[in-house]
Amino acid sequence: MIEDVRGHLDYDAVGAGPTIVLVPGSCSTGAAWRPIMDALGGRFRCVTTSLLGYGRTTERRTARDPSITHETDVVEAVVRRAGGRVHLVGHSFGGLVSLAVALGGRVPLASLTIAEAPAMELLRACGEHHHYQAFRQMTATYFADFERGNADAIATMIDFYGGVAGTFAAWPPRLRAYAAETTPVNILDWASAYGFPLPPAALAALEMPVLIARGGASPPAVQRANGLLAECIDGATLATLRGAAHFMIATHAHEVAGLIARHVLAAEARLTSLKDKATAPA
């Protein structure tokens, strides 16, 4: 745990090797990455955290101030504690926060991996209004249902991301209970995401190896948003996992871990090559 004047931050580190900071999404803690870490087989130093309001990480946002900068502060603190240049990996809302960290440029990153970020504002910036409205309609239904007192209103969001009705109902009771309990936090997450502009020009300025992963069975709006990220980021690699949907870090852990490992090792090789060139005699 990291002690901070504004509240605690989850922090855990295991393993040895190149450092990967793993940022989970909404309704999750660092434990969500266990299948990925198991599949990585101890080849890397894995650092995990939880975003604001989840696990032991203290919420800092309010309905009046849901700025994503509060989330980037958390991840930047984790990166600084991890030390050195890290490989940042984020899933879902954690992917959007990780992208915001990379765009901010305040901590040293060796590479960035984003798995299904809710990049709705990029859809809007690129005129993809049909896909943007798919997100807006889903969240409007979800929020209204919660306001009416449905404790399981978050099922609308989970089923949307899962690609099929009944995704939430099929989750283990403990996971369903945690998602329902943290619904107010998740609603703040959506406010943070909708309030984060994503102009293509800013994405084009990123200068690091970037991998975008999306599920082939994910909703069209989610697939398109992440496809646009890959199109706008110069040199980004887009990987579509056949048969996977949004919760790929649990359902397709070995495939996702393989993508991460290859991306990280390629970035490490690139850094080594750059160092060798910098130190070579003139």
Image (cartoon, helix red, strand yellow):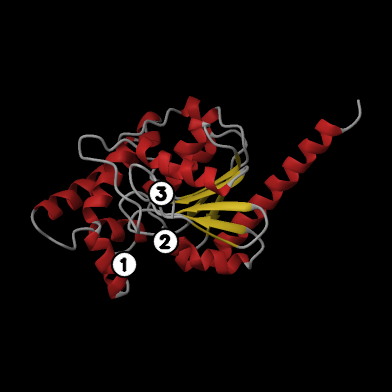
Residue at 30% across, 37% down:
194
The residue singled out by tag 2 in the image is 247
Q: Label 2 is placed on what type of residue?
A: Phe
| Residue 3 badge | 3
Left or right for 106, reference 130: right
The quarter of the image holding the C terminus is: top right
Residue 102, x across and y down, in percent? 51, 36
Mark 3 crowdedness (10 Å alpha carbons): few <14, some 14-19, many ≥20: few
Q: What is the CA distance from the residue labelled 2 to the residue labelled 3? A: 30 Å
Mark 2 crowdedness (10 Å alpha carbons): few <14, some 14-19, many ≥20: many
Front position among marks 2 and 3: 3
Q: Which badge, 1 or 2, comes first in the chain's sequence?
A: 1
Q: Is residue 252 visible?
A: no
Q: Label 1 is placed on what type of residue?
A: Thr
For the residue pair 78 and 193, the one nearer the viewer reads as: 78
Secondary-structure class at tag 2: loop
Circles 1 and 2, Cβ within 8 Å, touching? The answer is: yes
Secondary-structure class at tag 1: helix
Q: What is the CA distance from the residue labelled 1 to the residue labelled 2? A: 10 Å
Front position among marks 3 and 1: 3
| Residue 167 badge | 1
Q: Label 3 is placed on what type of residue?
A: Glu
Residue 141, x across and y down, in percent? 18, 50
For the residue pair 106 and 141, the one nearer the viewer reads as: 106
Secondary-structure class at tag 3: loop
Left or right for 101, reference 25: right
